[in-house]
């Protein structure tokens, strides 16, 4: 009873949130899972339970392998987005960390795209990534044309093989600044003594970064990867705004929406559960890892 | 391994520790060249947005998008504003309550989880955090049914409710980390010895020193509610929804008026950009807070 | 336990705050509520000729239904693609508009099956519509003995629009009547330095072109059979159709997947292309854009086949102002309403008692064809297939646009047919 008196008020204060999350996160996930195991393929409702048939169909019996195609698109998008944003972010943070006059200005500009919604930036990227080349070229192709860098001209997202790599460009543009801010905080969080100690040992600048500073940034890099990674898997707004829903640029998040529009609840539930599992595979180990790491301090 | 990410600390830590050296070697030429090159790259889309929004007639076109307007006009801004105004106001009605309510809930939760820890608090916290990462598609189908059943009015009220619920994890995280690093254990202990209970400790001692945390959660929730499209398109529509839907309708029209859509994109981005420029330091703090641990 | 009680009060307080703010700022956009005199009409007619047609109808509605107020719920884009998404979302949210536009035929079946639209059979008798519309159309509208929608017009999908100057410059003097002569003409235009003489846009516009090719290669009856299960999608004729379609795609613009139909139309207007296959709403749209130098012909090899689609209006289940909606529907079906609408929109009236002289040149020709021609439905516009089937077909065409895999497209379409036919 004493324990309850001690912890009770805290738990009570927390309980509305816990109840809401239990219902709206875990409860609804369970509900979606149930729908995904049913045969609710139209607005008339469900007649019964079909086990994992909907999942099997997604992977083995989807017309034109639409689902695996959307996974392939997502994979290309995620790779380009992660690599691009991490490299650019690290490079920018490194430039600023080396000391640049007017650093505040550079930092502000690099970071500003983060404040803009994907829907708004999609409006202009749709133009920048205009697929026409040569005389009628617009957007980035026109820039490359006038710089005599014609070989850089591209059909962007309309390219059937690597179009999704172009689709990642606006995302890189938008989030590199965020990665930069994370790394910059990481750089600045490294104790000055460490640098000085290394300098005393006669380490070159290269060795200082290689052996002292970059290893210290590993946790920051991990955080950044996790944040970008889960954003990437959920990517919806950007693609809706740039290309609209269509085969070429379809990712699971959009496939869910398209399927839902034809009232095929069971199928769209199955796709979204696969999406959830993809995210969970990355996030759950990370959460457990940080939880442990915290206990060890 | 640290548990920080106290946002204000992170903001401070962005400030350069030392003045840049004065020498200009070949290294710094490369450095500045790169910095300026990327500056231009980042600003390019903004340039196209601004320039196009002031164009009219045959000036507007994919092929001439880099040219300055031959005649500057604000007609498209007027058109875009007319199209977006109702949803612009609605989005404030959405984003402000979301920011305030989520922050209050987050502060209470964060306090309990950081300084009034009960057995198993870590597990509970991890379960809460997971809610931050889920793809919302995985809850969308029943969510639509459930809000219809509860009877919350469609449109903004529904969205307020939903953003508040799914904002609990991030706000709890921000405040938990904030309290863990800025509120000394002794302060809470002393209050407890004096016989103050949880609520009094929270309202009298904790809340007054929580302003920096509030700034971060308010900015974070405001921006994410403002920029959200997924919840909006599932739970609202052009008639009662926020500005992202209205903008997408404007820009996706059959014969899209490019100048008006670009002006519309700028109008849509203004509030968040303003928040970002005016409250930039805290905005960055908010971004840092998005990373679970640093 | 005194703090427990306070904590409980705080909890209730927070919950109350949540609910209060949720209810307090309820502002649903102004309309709605019972006893409303507003009729929200949901369409995808936001621009050009379509907007003009809607305006004409609204003017007539104002005369016929005094006291009711029209509220425009139009959502622009993609021949209804955007609007259908928004509409599906609203219907699932149980927040229907007072009436919405839906293609008559198979597409309407989705809404009927879902119980989202009301039976209008009794009103058909009251308004005398059963005799005003042609028998064939009435049969198409009837599902299990009931009628659920009022068609406002008839459109024709299988029409090729041309830029007269570009065609003349290429030395072409007569319209092609079969695929071979069409391709010969495309080569002539191409020889004049126009790289992509046939303008086209994204997935659904490609589906339209493909359907027209199929009508040519299969004939009207077998084409109709594709959509009701009587024709096999795996047949050699379909393979030939896909190959012909593939050949035609080589004459089209490379950026097709990035364009909507109006972007493709602009290519024709600008003389960057000579031809575009599009529904006959293009006539009104070209007129509205003050482009006069156009001509048209039925897709080569289609003969007298008239591929039809009809825009119709319904009474959604749970409409807030059912009385106002019925008055709107009555106006839509009336002779005056159909005239006000169709003369502006570029479609032809569904009613048989219309006077051809009231209509512009293109429509007079179409009205004559409608009476004499063989009628086939359209999948891209929902008279032949349900939305699920349409989505699968669009997706298949979108994939074909990039991979050009003939066998793959045929397999995908056959799979879609077996999944969706008669469902």
Image (tube, coloured by chain):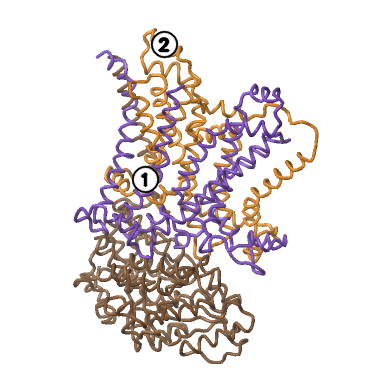
Q: Chain B is drawn in which colour?
A: orange
B190 versus B78 height, above or below: above
Q: Where is residue C156 in the image (x, y as percent from the top left)?
A: 40, 79
Can residue B270 be seen here? The reply is no
Q: Nearer the viewer, residue A203 or B287?
A: A203
Q: Where is residue B62 in the image (x, y as percent from the top left)?
A: 62, 63
On residue C41, the disc is none
Q: Nearer the viewer, mark 1 or mark 2?
A: 1
Q: Mark 1 lies on which chain?
A: A
Left or right for A211, reference A14: right
Q: Which of A230 and C123 is in front in this view?
A: A230
The residue identified by callout 1 is A277
- Location of residue A26 by image quarter: top left
Residue at point 44%, 74% (across, down): C345
C373 versus C130 height, above or below: below
Residue at point 52%, 38% (across, down): A224
Chain in purple (letter)? A
Q: Where is residue B112 in the image (x, y as percent from the top left)?
A: 38, 22
Residue at point 56%, 58% (across, down): A126
Chain in brown (letter)? C
Q: Mark 2 lies on which chain?
A: B
C59 versus B53 height, above or below: below
Around disc 1, counting alpha carbons within 10 Å, would you say few (fewer than 14), some (14 to 19), or many (20 or more)?
some
Say whether marks 1 and 2 touch (CB < 8 Å): no
- Location of residue A245 by image quarter: bottom left
Q: How far apart are marks 1 and 2 (CA)?
A: 44 Å
Around disc 2, counting alpha carbons within 10 Å, would you say few (fewer than 14), some (14 to 19), or many (20 or more)?
some
Left or right for B126, reference C2: right
**At numbered mark 2, what does the secondary structure look like: helix, strand or loop?**
helix
Can residue C17 be seen here? The reply is yes
The residue identified by callout 2 is B191
Left or right for B223, reference C65: right
């Amino acid at each position: 009873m004493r324990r309850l008196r001690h912890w009770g008020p805290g738990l009570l204060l927390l309980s509305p949130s816990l109840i809401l999350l239990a219902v709206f996160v875990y409860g609804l996930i369970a509900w979606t899972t149930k729908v995904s195991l049913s045969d609710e393929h139209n607005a008339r409702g469900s007649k019964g339970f079909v086990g994992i048939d909907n999942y099997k169909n997604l992977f083995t019996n989807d017309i034109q392998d639409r689902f695996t195609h959307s996974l392939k698109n997502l994979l290309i998008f995620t790779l380009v987005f992660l690599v691009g944003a991490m490299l650019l972010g690290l490079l920018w943070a490194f430039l600023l960390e080396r000391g640049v006059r007017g650093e505040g200005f550079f930092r502000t500009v690099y970071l500003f795209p983060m404040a803009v919604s994907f829907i708004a930036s999609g409006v202009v990227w749709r133009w920048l990534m205009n697929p026409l080349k040569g005389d009628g070229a617009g957007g980035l192709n026109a820039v490359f044309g006038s710089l005599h860098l014609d070989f850089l001209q591209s059909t962007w997202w309309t390219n059937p093989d690597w179009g999704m790599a172009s689709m990642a460009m606006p995302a890189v543009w938008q989030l590199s600044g965020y990665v930069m801010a994370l790394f910059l905080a990481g750089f600045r969080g490294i104790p000055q003594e460490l640098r000085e100690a290394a300098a005393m040992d006669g380490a070159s600048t290269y060795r200082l970064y290689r052996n002292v500073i970059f290893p210290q940034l590993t946790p920051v890099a991990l955080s950044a990867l996790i944040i970008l990674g889960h954003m990437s898997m959920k990517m919806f707004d950007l693609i809706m705004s740039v290309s609209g829903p269509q085969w070429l640029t379809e990712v699971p998040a959009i496939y869910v929406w398209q399927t839902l529009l034809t009232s095929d609840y069971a199928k769209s539930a199955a796709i979204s559960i696969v999406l959830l599992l993809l995210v969970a595979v990355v996030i759950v180990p990370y959460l457990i890892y940080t939880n442990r790491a915290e206990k060890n301090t | 391994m640290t548990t920080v990410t106290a946002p204000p600390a992170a903001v401070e830590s962005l400030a350069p520790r030392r003045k840049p050296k004065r020498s200009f070697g070949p290294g710094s030429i490369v450095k500045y060249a790169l910095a300026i090159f990327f500056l231009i790259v980042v600003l390019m889309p903004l340039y196209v947005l601004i320039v196009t929004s002031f164009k009219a007639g045959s000036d507007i076109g994919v092929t001439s998008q880099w040219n300055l307007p031959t005649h500057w006009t604000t007609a498209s801004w007027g058109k875009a504003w007319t199209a977006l105004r109702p949803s612009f106001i609605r989005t404030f009605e959405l984003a402000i309550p979301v920011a305030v309510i989520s922050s209050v809930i987050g502060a209470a939760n964060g306090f309990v989880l950081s300084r009034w820890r009960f057995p198993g608090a870590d597990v509970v916290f991890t379960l809460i955090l997971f809610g931050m990462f889920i793809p919302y598609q995985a809850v969308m189908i029943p969510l639509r049914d459930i809000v219809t059943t509860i009877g919350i009015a469609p449109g903004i009220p529904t969205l307020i409710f939903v953003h508040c619920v799914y904002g609990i994890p991030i706000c709890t995280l921000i405040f938990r980390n904030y309290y863990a690093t800025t509120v000394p254990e002794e302060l809470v202990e002393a209050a407890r010895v004096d016989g103050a209970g949880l609520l009094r400790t929270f309202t009298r001692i904790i809340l007054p020193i929580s302003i920096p945390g509030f700034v971060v959660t308010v900015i974070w929730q405001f921006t994410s509610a403002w920029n959200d499209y997924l919840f909006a398109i599932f739970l609202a529509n052009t008639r009662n929804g926020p500005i992202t839907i209205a903008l997408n309708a404007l820009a996706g029209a059959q014969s899209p008026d490019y100048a008006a859509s670009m002006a519309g994109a700028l109008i849509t981005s203004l509030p968040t950009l303003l928040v970002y420029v005016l409250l930039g330091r805290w905005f960055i703090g908010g971004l840092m807070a998005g990373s679970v641990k640093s | 336990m005194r703090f427990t009680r306070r904590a409980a009060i705080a909890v209730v307080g927070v919950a109350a705050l949540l609910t209060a703010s949720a209810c307090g700022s309820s502002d649903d956009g102004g309309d709605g509520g019972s006893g409303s005199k507003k009729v929200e009409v949901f369409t995808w007619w936001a621009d050009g000729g379509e907007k003009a047609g809607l305006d004409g109808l609204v003017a007539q509605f104002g005369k016929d239904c005094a006291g009711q107020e029209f509220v425009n719920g139009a959502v622009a884009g993609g021949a209804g693609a955007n609007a259908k998404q928004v509409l599906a979302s609203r219907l699932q949210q149980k927040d229907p508009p007072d009436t919405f536009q839906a293609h008559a035929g198979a597409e309407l079946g989705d809404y009927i099956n879902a119980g989202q639209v009301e039976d209008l059979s009794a009103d058909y008798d009251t308004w005398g519509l059963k005799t005003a519309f042609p028998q064939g159309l009435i049969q198409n509208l009837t599902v299990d003995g009931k009628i659920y929608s009022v068609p406002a017009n008839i459109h024709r999908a299988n029409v090729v629009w041309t830029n007269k100057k570009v065609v003349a410059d290429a030395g072409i003097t007569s319209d092609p009547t079969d695929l071979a002569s069409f391709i010969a003409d495309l080569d002539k235009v191409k020889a004049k330095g126009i790289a992509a003489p046939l303008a086209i846009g994204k997935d659904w516009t490609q589906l339209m072109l493909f359907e027209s090719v199929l009508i040519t290669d299969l004939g009207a009856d077998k084409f109709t059979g594709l959509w009701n299960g009587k024709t096999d999608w795996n047949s050699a004729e379909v393979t030939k159709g896909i190959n012909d379609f593939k050949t035609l795609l080589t004459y089209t613009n490379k950026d097709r997947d990035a364009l909507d139909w109006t972007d493709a139309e602009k290519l024709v207007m600008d003389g960057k292309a000579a031809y575009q296959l599009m529904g006959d709403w293009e006539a009104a749209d070209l007129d509205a854009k003050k482009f006069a130098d156009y001509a048209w012909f039925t897709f080569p090899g289609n003969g007298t086949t008239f591929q039809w689609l009809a825009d119709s209006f319904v009474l959604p289940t749970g409409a807030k102002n059912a009385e106002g909606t019925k008055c709107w529907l009555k106006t839509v079906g009336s002779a005056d309403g159909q005239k006000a609408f169709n003369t502006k929109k570029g479609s032809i009236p569904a009613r048989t008692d219309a006077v051809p002289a009231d209509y512009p040149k293109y429509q007079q020709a179409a009205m004559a064809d409608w009476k004499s021609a063989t009628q086939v439905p359209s999948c891209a516009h929902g008279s032949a297939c349900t939305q699920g089937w349409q989505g699968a077909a669009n997706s298949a065409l979108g994939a074909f646009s990039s991979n050009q895999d003939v066998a793959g497209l045929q397999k995908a379409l056959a799979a879609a047919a077996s999944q969706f036919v008669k469902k």
